[in-house]
């Protein structure tokens, strides 16, 4: 796995934290953490997008962030576990994984090696 994809995965990990922070932050320090997570998340996604196909990077970032946020809601905040929700997350992740598998990392014009 190349370093650029690792940046996308880490960016998606931080996306989960800032999305949770947008909902639950109520004081200075949680908001500070939320802002830091936003900066890290978007910085890594933008850096990866400079060398990888942007559409695929964004799809993987959003898909993993969405799945992670829903799972965090279930695990951390007691959101009810519903089979349709889990099945739809599985479909979303299957699409993201499929995009990643069929995308040539150097398929866009102007992408530097």
Image: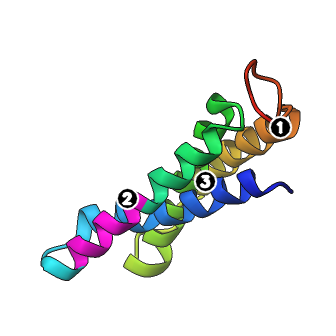
Q: What element carries label 2?
A: helix
Q: Does the magenta-highlighted stretch encompass residue 112?
A: no
Write down the region rendered in magenta: 30-39
Looking at marks 3 and 2 on the same chain, the residue that comes earlier in the sequence is marked by 2
The picture places residue 60, in percent across and down from the top left corner, at 65, 44
82 displayed left or right of 30: right
Q: Residues within 10 Å of mark 2 (few under 14, many from 20)?
A: some
Looking at marks 1 and 3 on the same chain, the residue that comes earlier in the sequence is marked by 3
The residue under the point 61% across, 63% down is 10
Name the foreground residue: 44 vs 64.
Answer: 44
**Residue carrying label 3:** 64
Number of residue marks: 3
Quadrant (top left, top right, bottom left, bottom right) of the N terminus = bottom right
The picture places residue 88, in percent across and down from the top left corner, at 61, 46
Q: Distance between the residues labelled 1 and 3?
A: 25 Å
Q: Looking at this view, name the residue that lies furthest to the left.
A: 27
Dominant SS of magenta comes to: helix
Q: How crowded is mark 1: few (under 14 residues within 10 Å), some or many (20 or more)?
A: few
**Residue carrying label 1:** 113
Q: How far apart are marks 3 and 2 (CA)?
A: 15 Å
Q: Does the magenta-highlighted stretch encompass residue 35?
A: yes
- Vertical position of residue 98 compared to residue 61: above or below: above
- Vertical position of residue 28 compared to residue 44: above or below: below
The residue under the point 87% across, 32% down is 102
Tell me the quarter of the picture where residue 34 sits.
bottom left
**Residue carrying label 2:** 38
The colour scheme used to paint the residues is rainbow
Q: Nearer the viewer, mark 1 or mark 3?
A: 1
């Amino acid at each position: 796995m190349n370093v650029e994809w690792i940046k996308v995965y880490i960016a998606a990990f931080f996306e989960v934290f800032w999305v949770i922070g947008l909902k639950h932050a109520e004081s200075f320090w949680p908001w500070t953490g939320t802002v830091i997570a936003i900066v890290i998340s978007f910085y890594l996604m933008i850096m990866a997008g400079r060398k990888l196909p942007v559409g695929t990077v964004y799809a993987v970032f959003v898909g993993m962030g969405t799945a992670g946020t829903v799972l965090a809601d279930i695990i951390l905040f007691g959101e009810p576990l519903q089979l349709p929700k889990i099945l739809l997350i599985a479909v979303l992740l299957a699409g993201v994984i499929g995009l990643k598998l069929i995308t040539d990392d150097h398929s866009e014009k102007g992408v530097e090696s």
